[in-house]
Image (cartoon, helix red, strand yellow):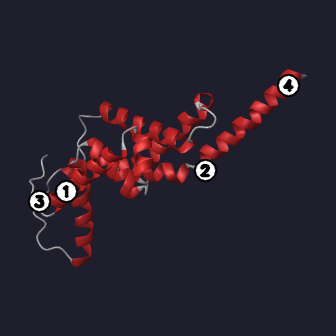
Amino acid sequence: MDTNRKNANQSSVSAELARLVADERAYLRRYALGLCHDISLADDLAQECMERALTRLHLWQNGTNLRAWLSTMLRNLHINGLRRHRHHVRLDDCDGADLGSVPARQIGRMQMRDLRRALSRLPSDQREMVVMVALRGASYEQAARNAKISVGTVKSRLSRARDTLRRLMEGEMEARA
């Protein structure tokens, strides 16, 4: 009888934990979008992260930060994906024909494209800090905990990233391919 109660208790804890993981779906999609800059890839990455988390609930330690656990898992999945697909070239990284005159409504899209390109030129540690703090809205302390670095390092990486982004966007720095 005691074993039945223990199994029932474990099932209810697992069900509650699975619900908490499912509640993080929107957050995981936003974080994935910040990492890979492509909606369909972000959806796939978030889905893969949720699947992995749900199949590994037994590895989560009670009392730890679930969002940090999921963020680390998603980031590692993204890095592993980058390593697997290094030879792929994104189409918006290729220079096309001369655009000629551009209607005013397209200027915003072009600026966003330029920003995505500039972000992709940042070293991964700097880009990660920009994504965590600027896109996800994490505090410096949260970003430091997630990346397992000091708050000073977070601030330093953000400062260098912002300076590089500004120079790339203003044309002061040549965007490397």
Which residue is painted at 65% across and 40% down in the image?
Answer: 18
Specify which label sits upstream in the sequence, 1 or 3: 3
Which residue is painted at 52% across and 54% down in the image?
Answer: 26
Q: Amino acid at mark 3?
A: Ala
Residue under pointer 3? 97
Specify which label sits upstream in the sequence, 4 or 1: 4
- From the top left corner, tell me how far across and down residue 58 is, in percent: 63, 28
Secondary structure under tag 2 reads helix
CB-based contact (under 8 Å), mark 3 and mark 4: no
Residue under pointer 1? 163
Mark 2 Cα shell of 10 Å, populated few (<14), some (14-19), many (≥20): few
Q: Amino acid at mark 4?
A: Asn
Which residue is painted at 22% across and 72% down in the image?
Answer: 107
Q: Amino acid at mark 1?
A: Asp
Mark 1 Cα shell of 10 Å, populated few (<14), some (14-19), many (≥20): few
Q: CA distance from mark 1 to mark 2?
A: 36 Å
Specify which label sits upstream in the sequence, 1 or 2: 2
Question: Which marked residue is nearer to the observer: mark 3 or mark 4?
Answer: 4
Residue under pointer 2? 23
Residue under pointer 4? 4
**The disc label shown at residue 150, or none:** none
Mark 3 Cα shell of 10 Å, populated few (<14), some (14-19), many (≥20): few
Tell me if I can see residue 76 in this picture: yes
Mark 4 Cα shell of 10 Å, populated few (<14), some (14-19), many (≥20): few
Secondary structure under tag 3 reads loop
Q: CA distance from mark 4 to mark 2?
A: 29 Å
CB-based contact (under 8 Å), mark 4 and mark 2: no
Image-based side of 114 in relation to 51, left or right: left
In depth, the one of 155 and 175 nearer the eye is 155
Q: CA distance from mark 3 to mark 4?
A: 69 Å
Specify which label sits upstream in the sequence, 2 or 3: 2
